[in-house]
Image (spheres, rainbow, N blue to C red):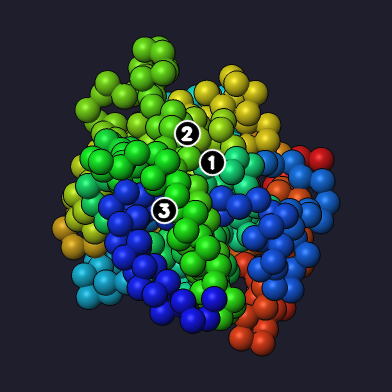
Amino acid sequence: MNRSLPSLLLSRRTLLRQIAQGAGWLSLAGLLDASSSFASSSGSTDTAAGIAHFPARAKRIILLFQHGGPSQIDLFDPKPELLKYVGKPMPGGVEAFFDQQDSSLCSPSPFQFRQHGECGMHFSELLPHLSHCADDLLMIRSMHTLVNDHEGALRHFQTGKPRAGRPSIGAWLTYALGTQNRKLPPYVVLSDPNHDQVDGNRNWTSGFLPPLCQGTPLRCDGEALFDLELPDGIIPQMQQDNLALLELLNREHQKQFKHLGDLDARIANNALAGQIGEEIRSAMDLSQETAQTHQAYGMNDQDTGTYSRRCLMARRLLERGVRFVAVFNDAIMGDPWDTHSEHNARIRKISRNVDQPCAALIQDLKQRGLLEDTVVMWIGEFGRLPVTQGKDGRDHNRHAFTALVAGGGFRRGMTYGATDDFGYKITKNPLAVGELHATLLRQFGLDHAKLTYRHQGRDESLTDTDITGVQPRLELVEG
């Protein structure tokens, strides 16, 4: 075997080029079940074999991430007292990101609020569809984060800390629980097909966890993955023979370089390259849905853009065993909710883009009996200030923002936490990002303090409770 190794390695390089033409790039993370690859890469946690710490209320999650910082005082948190301060300095001032541009003059919301549902939850006129879901929602008005810049705040929410290089929430869940369908990735990312996401794949990275745990971006227009079709002159049996040989060569390579975890992901990708095409096409094929469903999600409405397609695809993926789907916004005038200028006009347009698809998704899951064990989370990285930036904008506010959560055993029809008369700082039940993470993991049957991975001599975790001290907030969940 050793004598023939040089020629084998040469063939391997040749085959890699050929397979790249046939199978293409397949970032299909976590397609091996928990009892094989995840168990062998388990580090210091006992959950890598799919063993939960206690009974789970949730089996799957859709993260409707609202990139850019939605304005809580224009959407969820009415502040009539602000009207008394129109054009007056904010008492005590504010912490602004663009401090040279902020006027420090109070700017109340021009949008009308009403109470909705039996619970009387407040929504502004900008969200007429989501407001109909009030009795199924937990509204958290007291979220706060550590940093005031987009990249840092994004990483804080997605990975637990503001710095780069750490695993995302979806990666931790994938690592802990494995996959439910070996022919689909357990962690899927659906973002605007025409624009890169701010901070890119750091939003769904596996960090120091095995590469099998990273998110898999799928496209909502055209082919979900590139190069699923075989090239001319290649028949399925030829591809299977090539892949079998490639796996043999990779295994030989792995014996020499056992520390390279990305080999597991590469072997899994290649082994499944000839099997996944039909499964993915079926999951992403919206023509199988009724005209009534298309209308409910707003797919025929230009204002909802491709966002409505991604929300419907998210439901179809969950039905087929995908555990975690992250849906990102359409790029509207740049970073969608980052309204440093033309705030009122922009927030109206962005709300129109997401309101109907998000509400339809929640109602669709409920109608199908999936909402009980599916978490739907609507959240951004921070909120906006109650003062004017420049002529007509709002700057970042890390001290208070709002999140919506539905399903998965979270409380329904409850408004949690409160802010001051300006919507600037929290006055009741402050909720840190890590506390929300710990609570979310608990709903999946996972103890956030025990879900760890040995990295550089330390047992790392999503919440890092030894340092942060965060614990789940049981008042946010039922029972």
> Residue sitting at 38 percent across and 27 percent down?
285
Depth check, front residue: 256 or 314: 256
> Residue sitting at 63 percent across and 28 percent down?
370
For marks 1 and 2 on the same chain, the one whose residue lies earlier in the sequence = 1
Quarter-of-image position of residue 394 = bottom left
**In the rendering, at what x and y percent does residue 201 appear?**
38, 62
> Residue sitting at 41 percent across and 13 percent down?
290
For marks 3 and 1 on the same chain, the one whose residue lies earlier in the sequence = 1
- How many other residues sit within 10 Å of disc 3, few (<14), some (14-19) or many (≥20)? some
Eyeballing the image, is 232 above or below 366?
A: below
Circle 1 SS class: loop
Quarter-of-image position of residue 174 = bottom right
Residue picked out by circle 1: 183
- How many other residues sit within 10 Å of disc 2, few (<14), some (14-19) or many (≥20)? few
Q: How many dots with numbers?
A: 3
For marks 3 and 2 on the same chain, the one whose residue lies earlier in the sequence = 3
Residue picked out by circle 2: 279
Quarter-of-image position of residue 199 = bottom left
Q: Are marks 1 and 2 in contact (CB under 8 Å)?
A: yes
